[in-house]
Amino acid sequence: MTVIWTQDGIVEDDPWSQPESEGGPKLLPLAEALDHAQDNAPFGVVLQPADDVRALAPILERVAIVALTFPAFSDGRAFSQAMLLRERLGYQGEMRAVGTVLLDQVPLMLRTGFDSFEVEHAPTIKRLAEKRLPGIDLHYQPAADETRAGPGYSWRRTAMLNG
Amino acid sequence: MYRYDEFDHAFVAARVSQFRDQVERRLTGEISEDAFKPLRLMNGVYLQLHAYMLRVAVPYGTLDSRQMRKLAHIARTYDRGYGHFTTRQNIQYNWPKLSDIPAILEELAEVEMHAIQTSGNCIRNVTADHFAGAAADEVADPRPYAEILRQWSSVHPEFSFLPRKFKIAVTAAERDRAAIQTHDIGLQLKKNDQGELGFAVWIGGGQGRTPILAKKVRDFLPEADLLSYVTAIMRVYNLHGRRDNKYKARIKILVHETGVEQLSAEIEAEWQHLKDGELKLPEADIAAINAYFEPPKLAPRAEGWGELAAWKKSDPGFADWVGRNVAPHRHPDYAMVTISLKPIGGIPGDASAAQMDAVARLAEEFAHDEIRVTHEQNLVLPHVALADLEPLYRALLADGLATANAGLITDIIACPGLDYCALANARSIPVAQEISNRFGDPARQAEIGDLKIKISGCINACGHHHVGHIGILGVEKKGAELYQISLGGSGDENASIGQITGRGFEPHQITDAIETIVDTYLAQRSSTEETFIECYRRIGADPFKAALYSSEAEAA
Amino acid sequence: MKTASTKTKVLTANRLTDGIAVWLGANGEWTTSLKEAFLARHDDAVAAIEAAGQQALDDNRVVDVNVIEVEETEAGPRPFRLRERIRSDGPTIDYAPAFTAGVSHAA
């Protein structure tokens, strides 16, 4: 079973994972999202790894959620897409990881600005529900997450709070 | 050398527990091998033919004696009493149990070492000139910058799942001993006209199936911009590098297919957004890291000059060793000593636990506690007084570490090959051993002079065969081993990719073929001063090909 | 090649906990000696060892499971591929004198 997880826990009744036939709002591919930007209904965007996130800049204010796709654990393009969305485009809405979401990648996804996760693997869901993230609270580089300046050198950061 | 502060200790401890948790999940079956493989690789754990293999990082090849003793201890306690120093300045253990690896990592953490990012599609151990901090020809020590890159790249959230592995090398001398042109990013530390430090930046070098030399994208990048500029390169590569074919996934292919001008423009455009951001390096931080690499206080030892001359006169073996393995230090009373891990007929790069302990002891006694690992699979004591060379030599001799062959034909680079490696198609080590035995006579080696033979057991080119003066590539053909020869490669500041001579040689023919090449060189060289590579560049491949293949043509 | 199915086959893998090369024995246990491997001489037997391999993989006892072809000799099964001969006999070089001396001394 697929669930949506955020730092607040498992999300019940996530509107974006309702089937469209049941009235759920739409996650649109990039091209369609650019076309629908003038509509009034809320919409989200689902991007593929090859999409240029910068194309969203003109419509970003109207986007309710951006889902970035990990077609396989080894395809890390969405990490850079996430960084560009948060740091370059200043996007502040929900950013969801969809596709292959491995437990051990979730801490890295949180650092690059993801805040919701579509997860299928049962042991992963269990660990996330228990908030047992396999991450490290000390970082050697700034990213898109909220951190404190680390001790020692300008590039270091520490997590604001554990988990 | 760099010392961990509390932050580093806590980070590595956290990384060890993270990996312990990953191993436990694997052993209990919570995660499958498919899910575990990328996790173990990112911590240097491979599955090879006979067992797991653990690759331990030796950042920019720098060790102290405490660390070397720990490596010996691990070899003895968790492995079969030896380790293998690699072409990326790391060390590999060939027989650790998966269930022991968390304990090994804990032991390594005690001496400020780890296995982070020694494999996987991430930024690998940053390598540097093995003479850094001692060489007379460097503008500054490049290792502080390698250390800054090491820290910044550790568990990088954006760049841990790149299209392919990513290797960065740093040098600070015109004579390139770090082979920067064969790296994904090559950095040459230099000074501009104002005397400020910065980097010439090269991208897109690599070996493997498609060897390509790096292209220069920046003539002078101010040192403060190091991390922001490397981030820009990494981001462009992460987004645009090919992911459809692992043999086309390295940045060299992106550079080649996009064109260096366009790719460089994309990097510059990305960098414009980053350069004044939080990655800009403050002067104080650069200075603080540099302070760790302060050279040792070397007292004048002028008495060594006279003693050295006398010892050389009385012991030809010692004189040979000084001639080959000892290089001038920037302090006139000192020298840089190469400890050859290439005994005649031995396994290139292997060292027993006893030898590691011996090197640790000698580093303490004679070399200000500093040891380096070279990409040529040797060790270096970078600060030895001339006055201490003779006792050092005696001690090395006792432990089988005084082979006087640095840079000679028996100083062979070889990957582990099919004796260990799950990727290999042919053996490398026995080929190296046979060549070493054939040319092992000191007089014969000296007559031949500088000649780099590099052997890989598959197209991944861990043995750097593309940049060997003589390169040997093992392939599998109809179920048997076959060895292709290439000539004219070089990994230094005059880098070049070797050219294949023609059809390959069977295992029993390969040493004869090497001998034919060497004899051709000896017959063709303009004088004893002309090295093999100089001669090859002057006369080209044809005389060598003729010698290798003509008898066969006549026979046919 | 269809004719390949007439060649004798054995099942090999590496143990999960220590990575040591193992072969599936006639008694259904994994053994560190190729000599004790179960020889699959016909298609049904090959299917059986493949199933056993999949089961052992699913049970997280072994990794990297492969069926390999061997030649039956007086000295025991001999893999056709050099790679598999090296997996069975160990590195072809005198790689750890201290270790191997210790072993033979103990034996």
Image: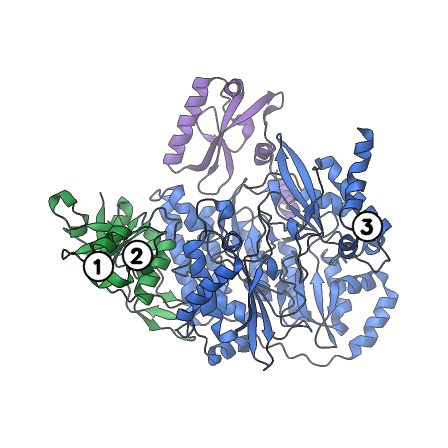
Chain colours: A green, B blue, C purple
Q: Residue at x 42, y 48 (%)?
A: B38
Picture quadrant where residue C46 is located: top left
Q: Which one is in front in this view, the residue at disc 3 or the one at disc 1?
A: 1
Kindly indicate whether the residues beneath marks 3 and 1 are on one polypeptide chain: no
Q: Nearer the viewer, residue B375 or B6?
A: B375
Q: Which residue is mark 1?
A: A63
Residue, disc 3? B521
In the image, residue C49 sits, relative to residue B218, either above or below, namely above
Q: How far across and down, in percent of the image, does residue B197 sit?
A: 56, 77
SS at circle 3: helix
Same chain for mark 2 and mark 3? The answer is no
Q: Chain of mark 1?
A: A
| Residue B438 makes an appearance in the image | no
Q: Which mark is residue A133?
A: 2
Name the spot of residue B376 as percent of width and height, x first: 66, 56
Q: Nearer the viewer, residue B416 or B223?
A: B223
Q: What's the residue type where badge 3 is placed?
A: Tyr
